[in-house]
Amino acid sequence: MNLILLGPPGAGKGTQAKVLQESRGLKQLSTGDMLRTAIAAGSEIGLKAKVIMDRGDLVSDEVILDVVAERMGKPDIKAGVVFDGFPRTPAQAQALDKMLAARGQKVDAVIEMKVEDEVLISRISGRYTCAKCGKGYHDSFAKPARPGICDACGSTEFTRRADDNEKTVRDRLNVYNKQTAPLVSYYTSRGNLRSVDGMADINHVTDAIGHILDGVQR
């Protein structure tokens, strides 16, 4: 099965992709991870991407699709894949369809994780992590049991990502709404888009996605 998780930054795509990898054997694929792996491996495509990235330029759709195709040719891709944050534009979606068709495959399901912008802003701008062990916390939703002390390791030092602030999140959402949101129409027209409430409890989202995939596999 080839699955796409669609949704704005902070919707929980990465979390659900990891669940699907563990529960259904679908390999989680994100373009960032695939690019880093290709570069580290020193493959022809990886070296090409490295030259572009070292110049500070954006990697083209063509190179990204080559990286995706290379990764999907690896032997550990058996049960299928779950694309996390890819494709990002209708042009990438069309190129992915073409690449999969050449392999005798297709996108089996696209699951949109719907979350309101203001909820996402609250989710992301409130995140912080333990500087020692990396355990994640949130100002409102996941505070340490003892204020200022990490539950996991007892450290009193915490960090926040520089881009986890309201302005940056709003900018990222604007980019998503302009470039990626049109994929909803693209996949709706192909009849394989389903939606889940991304604002629900994580376990409820997991169950909803599982129910959809059970129906697709039948």
Image (cartoon, rainbow, N blue to C red):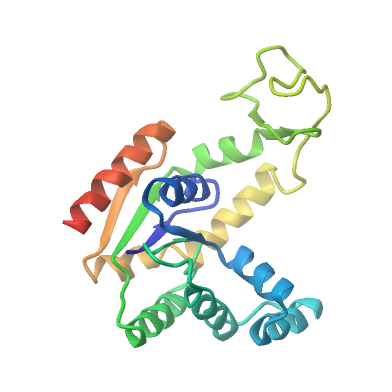
Between 48 and 92, the residue placed more toward the observer is 48
Q: State which quarter of the image contains the N terminus.
A: bottom left
Q: State which quarter of the image contains the C terminus.
A: bottom left
Between 168 and 216, the residue placed more toward the observer is 216
Q: Position of residue 146 (x, y in %)?
A: 71, 12
Picture quadrant of residue 185: bottom left
Picture quadrant of residue 66: bottom right
| Left or right: residue 199 compared with residue 29 | left
- Please tell me which residue is depicted at 80% across the width and 80% down the height of the picture: 55
| Left or right: residue 25 compared with residue 1 | right
Q: Position of residue 165 (x, y in %)?
A: 70, 42
Q: Position of residue 209 (x, y in %)?
A: 32, 46
| Left or right: residue 208 compared with residue 166 | left
- Please tell me which residue is depicted at 63% across the width and 55% down the height of the picture: 171
Residue 84 in view here: no
Vertical side of 186 occupied by 102: above or below: below
